[in-house]
Image (spheres, rainbow, N blue to C red):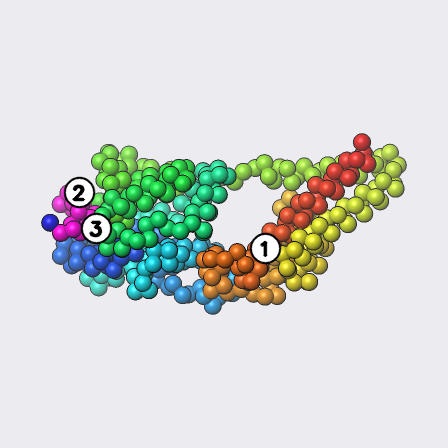
Amino acid sequence: MSELSKNVVDIDENLRLVGTAHISSASVELVRSQIEEWSPDLVAVELCESRKASLLEPDALDNEDLLKILNEGKSHMILLQSALAAEQRRMGISSGEKPGAELLAAIEAAEEADIPVELIDRDVLITLRRAWSKMGFIEKFRVLDALLWQEDDDEGASVEELLEDSDMLSKLMEEAREVAPAAGSVLIDERDAFLAGRIQQIRGRGKILAVVGAGHLNGIQENLAEPAMETASRIAELSVEPRKAIWPKALMIAIPLFLFGAVAWMGYNGEIEAIKQTAVAWLAINAGLTGLGVLLARGHPLSILVGAVASPITSLNPFLAAGWFAGYTQLKITPPTGGDAQAFLDLNELSLFWKNRVGKVLMVTAMGNFGSVVGTWVAAAGIASLLF
């Protein structure tokens, strides 16, 4: 038996699973040979539309203006491409072994043979949002630390070893679950169930060859052993995006309500001088601390000015933030490209937060917002002292 044959699993005469390593040239040959030899009626691929687009046009975003990318909702593609590049770099993979090449090979081979292709993975944005929402603060820190700064423990493993030993891929996935159990349930268990559900949905379309990551093979088989209707019915549940927390907005609404109430109370009691002091304190503290935040982020002088002017106003509106205006100004003055974004997301040195154009925009935005929040609370505390 071939070393690779254990990654080819026949569920029945009309369904074959092919487990691959997403970073292996050997996987490319395996996928092509399986399509040619087994002659399926349909090829199902572990991709969603977003991931497919990022694989088909890996350099499409490099020279696009970042603002255009954000406006068109393509920011997740930058994240995907950067994550793939980081994975490839950490494992020491040569430039000839592109992550996801075997998935593209499945699509290309199917098209050459005039075989329909079905994308069966959940949209990556939904997966990431569900994973992020389920993680606590400590888990989020562990994940960021593991992705951005820790060295890969399996650096010595070749891509052929990863493909030949599907248990090794499963082990890597389980290690990810140890770092963040809540995220692991979304990234592994939920996707196993989703992939199995999508396969059940298309089972009536003849012989199906499903190309999936080898680490998902066991989970998919377990889910396929469940009643078909039950497996397929979970897709709707697994596609729901998490709701955003309400309390941050409620808190930000409370502050301007408190300010307006305080001013109204002072006016009712004829304390005109106190109202003037309140207005001066609100303007000076908000503007000063916001401008200081943008300055510490090394923002452009115009970004500092815009953030400072906007802060006293945005602090009264829970749906606006001074840092957004400062960051937008910084973005327009020194517009980053998609290439800048990918370079920033490699995060191989902290100085990228100041040297890289994307890092600078993020720092200006974050520090502007931080300064505005601090200014709002300090000003509110000062106003409360006038009242009490």
Looking at the image, the residue that sits furthest to the bottom is: 63
Q: Give the residue at mark 2.
A: 11
Q: Quadrant of residue 34?
A: bottom left
Mark toward the start of the polypeptide (3 vs 2): 2
Q: Position of residue 97 (x, y in %)?
A: 30, 61
The local secondary structure at tag 3 comes to: helix
Q: Give the residue at mark 3.
A: 164
**Along the line of sight, the residue nearer the viewer: 369 or 168:** 168
The local secondary structure at tag 1 comes to: helix
60 magenta-colored: no
Instruction: Say if residue 359 shows up in the picture.
Output: no
Range shown magenta: 2-20
Q: Give the residue at mark 1.
A: 363
Q: Amino acid at mark 3?
A: Glu
Mark toward the start of the polypeptide (2 vs 1): 2
Give the CA separation, mark 3 to mark 2.
Answer: 20 Å
Is residue 295 found left or right of 180 in the rendered image? right
Instruction: Say if residue 352 shows up in the picture.
Output: yes
Question: In front: mark 3 or mark 1?
Answer: 3
Q: Quadrant of residue 273?
A: top right
Question: In front: mark 2 or mark 1?
Answer: 1
